[in-house]
Structures are given as C-alpha cells and as structure tokens.
Amino acid sequence: MRAVVSGGGGFLGSHLCESLLDRGDQVVCLDDWSTGSAENVAHLRGRSGFTVLDVDVSDPAALSAAGLTGPIDAVAHLASPASPPDYHRLPLETLAVGSRGTENLLRLAHDHDARFVLASTSEIYGDPLVHPQTEDYWGNVNSIGPRSVYDEAKRYAEAVTAAYRRSFGTDVGIIRIFNTYGPRMRAHDGRVVSTFICQALTGNPLTIYGDGSQTRSFCYVDDLIRGIAGMLDAAEFGPVNLGNPGEYTMRQLAEEVLRITGSTSAIEYHPLPTDDPTRRKPVITRAQDALGWEPKVPLDEGLRRTVAWFAGRPAEVTAAAAL
Ligand code: NAD
Ligand code: UDP
C-alpha cells in the first residue's frame, strides 16, 4: 500500500515509516520539523518508495502545494508536539495540528478513499477517576490548564474523526497511545524516560517531580509500532488503547534506570507540574481482540535497549543533562 505518515520525522513516526517500508509499503513522510529531526529519517532517504515532504499539515494551502500526488491507501496522523515541554512551548501550534491538521488529513483520506488512523493519546483520560483505563471511560480533563492545549486538541481530533465516519462514511480508526519510549527519543525532550537515562549516564541527579508516587505504563517503541501497523490494516474504528499494562511509580522507574545504567546518581525531588495525572494503566483487551496485539518487551529489556542507544550519543546526552 501507499501510506502517508504525518509527523513521520518524529520519534514514533520515523519508526512507523521504517516498519512500513520494511514490509514493502510505499511511504510519504510529512513533517514541519517543529519537534522532529531530519536525522530520524536520514537512513531511509534514498530507499525505494520513500518520499519526504516538508509541510505544516495545519496549513491547507501548504498541504495542497506540497506536491502530494498519486494514490493514497492510508493516512497515519501522528503530527503533533507530544512531550509536555514541547506543547507548553508550542501551545497554539499544538491546538492547530490537533484541530485543523486533523481535518486537513481527514479530507485528504476521504478524497483518496483511504483509511485514516489518528494517533490519539492516554491524555484523553486526563487525571483518571477510573483505574485502569478502558476505552469507554470519558476522562477527567481540565479544559483550561497548561496541559489542555494537548489534551483538548486530541479530544477534538477524536471528535472530528468520529464525525467524518458518521457524516461521510470515511474509513477511520483511533488509537490511544500510552507513554512510549525507545531509541530516537530526543535526549532533551523532557520526557521522563529520556531525562532519567541522560541524568543517570552523566552522573547528574535524577529529577523526580512530586513525591514520585504517580504512575505511568511504559510501552517499548517496537511493540507500539506493531500495533499502529495492525490498526492501519484493520477495519476497526476503536478507539483502541495501545500501551503496556505494566504500571510503575516514577520512583520505581528512577530505581530501575539507576540499576540498569549502574549509575550512582542521587535522586532529587522537584515540584509536581500542574494537572500532572496521578496514575495511568491501559486495559488492552480491545487491542488483543480486534488486532491480536499485545506488547512483548518488558520494561527492563526496553530500558536496556534505550540506554544502549543513548550511550552511543554522548554529546547529546551531556548537553541534555546540563539543561
Ligand atoms: P514527536 O514530537 O517526536 O513527533 C511528532 C512529529 O510531528 C515531529 O516530527 C514534528 O516535527 C511533527 N509535527 C508537529 N506538528 C506538525 C505540523 N503542524 N505539520 C507537520 N508535522 C508536524 O512525538 P512522538 O512521540 O513521535 O509522537 C507522535 C504522535 O503520537 C503524536 O501525535 C503524539 O500525540 C502521539 N503520542 C505519543 C506518545 C508517546 O509516548 N510518544 C503517547 C501518546 C500519543
Ligand atoms: N517526570 C519526572 N521527572 C522528569 C520528567 C517527568 O518525575 O524529569 C514525571 C512527570 O511529572 C510525570 C511522569 O514523569 O508524572 C511522566 O512524564 P512524561 O513527561 O514523560 O509523560 P506524561 O506526563 O505526558 O505522561
């Protein structure tokens, strides 16, 4: 098939582009490089069937002028700042790509009779009052807090995706991705896994926000990408949770990173950011039933692979740890 991947130059998008190319698909990567990196797809350039177009997908005129011609069988919409420091820095851009960007790509999919898959997020559930989270939980989101630019953009993106299905019969699917980690995360992106690893590798203190009792469920990137590819191939609307149900406090994560790196870094406690969710754990029975998907890589193995990847980039790691 010929797939369009918006945000294809980002952490997850670049792995998706690579995985689709590896199985013989053609891939058009759309990116404005606001939080992605050309280096993520440098090894894919020149591969048969791979095209990169520099475009802001929130701008319909730019998208029309980008030179996207030929058939399209699937659109995977991953474009969006995703790390909290990124969407705090780019609040209006985050709202734009979740709203106008999603509409522009839905129209593209509809016009080409293509399947559309939205990369939504566990942030839809906000600070959840139901634990663990099933897809029929409607969430607990502060609509005006600092995280709202991301959460509400994604909630609107889900709403407009569902509306295209109802209004036009567009073949759409929604995945709700839980915290994912692995090679090609940016060292300085501010997410907890990359931050703790860079701090541990450089002997700097690990910065736990709050008392570290808040939980997250971390999925290794290869597992997640298998799930996205499965959703592109399925006729499922979802929403489908994609995540690893293993649940860890941030204190446990810090200890695991220290154990795996063999670091003697101290642990420091910093204030908890506003509206930081207290817990997160996906129920994945829908993904198991609809896609035959479940994660395979346990946290310690995934962290080992991620640590090895960061250890090969000492300059980036040192620069990030100094921030
Ligand atoms: P990322 O920041 O590494 O990648 C996002 C990519 O989108 C970047 O390459 C960026 O340059 C591009 N982009 C942003 N705005 C754009 C625009 N207007 N036009 C074109 N390109 C644009 O983030 P990621 O972790 O790879 O996340 C990818 C997607 O998955 C996002 O939609 C995010 O919300 C979702 N997601 C990720 C996680 C996670 O843990 N990584 C969890 C839940 C949801
Ligand atoms: N966090 C932390 N130290 C850091 C960065 C993050 O303790 O240096 C915490 C953060 O407050 C949150 C959790 O780790 O409770 C996950 O943060 P991340 O930004 O990776 O993802 P999200 O909050 O979007 O789930």
Image (cartoon, helix red, strand yellow):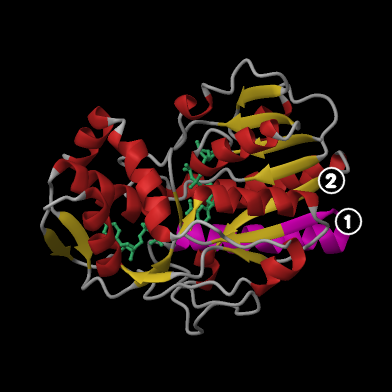
Residue 23's spot in the image, x, y percent? 72, 35
In depth, the one of 284 and 238 nearer the eye is: 284
Q: Which residues are magenta?
A: 148-173
Name the kind of residue labelled 2 in the image.
His
Quadrant of the image containing the C terminus: top left
Residue 143's spot in the image, x, y percent? 48, 69
Tell me if residue 104 comes above or below residue 41 in the rendering.
below
Q: Local crowd at mark 2 within 10 Å, few (<14), some, or many (≥20)?
A: many
Q: Local crowd at mark 1 within 10 Å, few (<14), some, or many (≥20)?
A: few
x 85%, y 30%: residue: 71
Residue 212 horizontal side relative to residue 128, left or right: left
Q: Residue furthest top?
A: 46
Q: How many marks?
A: 2
Q: Secondary structure at mark 2?
A: helix
C-alpha separation, residue under disc 1 versus residue under disc 2:
8 Å
Residue 302's spot in the image, x, y percent? 42, 52
Which numbered disc covers residue 168? 1
Residue 254's spot in the image, x, y percent? 25, 61
x 66%, y 74%: residue: 285
Which numbered disc covers residue 110? 2
Specify whether tag 2 is near ligand 1 (CB below 8 Å): no
Does the rendering let one see residue 25?
yes
Name the kind of residue labelled 1 in the image.
Phe
x 60%, y 58%: residue: 120
Tell me if residue 62 comes above or below residue 276 in the rendering.
above
Q: Main secondary structure of the magenta part?
A: helix
Quadrant of the image containing the N terminus: top right
Query: Hey, which quadrant is residue 310 in on the image?
Result: top left
Is the residue under label 2 in contact with that under label 1 (CB below 8 Å)?
Answer: yes
